[in-house]
Image (cartoon, rainbow, N blue to C red):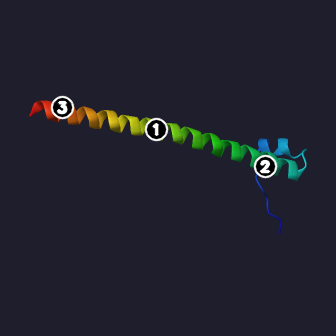
Amino acid sequence: MTEQVAHSPFLDALAGYPPWLVVAAAAVAAALALWLLSRVIKWMLWLLAVAVLVVGGGLAIWLLIAR
């Protein structure tokens, strides 16, 4: 019994390259994507920390003045 596998044009385009090269390129691309994602998350955490300090400080000042 033979199985039919769905072929995508993307995989057909990679068929001409050696498998080790495709895997190596995919690993490098995945590592780069993870590194970029970590940079974005780092900046988001810094912005969140600043926002919490600004809002918390503003709320503390407002509560101090409102009393």
Image quarter where the C terminus lies is top left
Q: Answer yes or no: do the residues labelled 2 and 3 have beta carbons within 8 Å? A: no
> Image height check: is 13 above or below 27?
above
Q: Answer yes or no: do the residues labelled 2 and 1 have beta carbons within 8 Å? A: no
Q: Is residue 20 left or right of residue 59?
A: right
Image quarter where the N terminus lies is bottom right
Which structural element holds mark 2? loop
Query: In which image quadrant can residue 47 be found?
Result: top left
**Residue labelled with disc 1:** 46
Q: CA distance from mark 3 to mark 1?
A: 24 Å
Percent position (x, y) of residue 64? 15, 34
| Residue at image coords 59%, 42% | 37
- Tally the numbered discs: 3
The amino acid beneath tag 2 is His
Mark earlier in primary sequence (2, 3)? 2
| Residue at image coords 75%, 49% | 27
Query: In which image quadrant can residue 35 be found?
Result: top right
> Image height check: is 19 above or below 53?
below
**Residue labelled with disc 2:** 7
| Residue at image coords 79%, 41% | 9
The amino acid beneath tag 1 is Trp
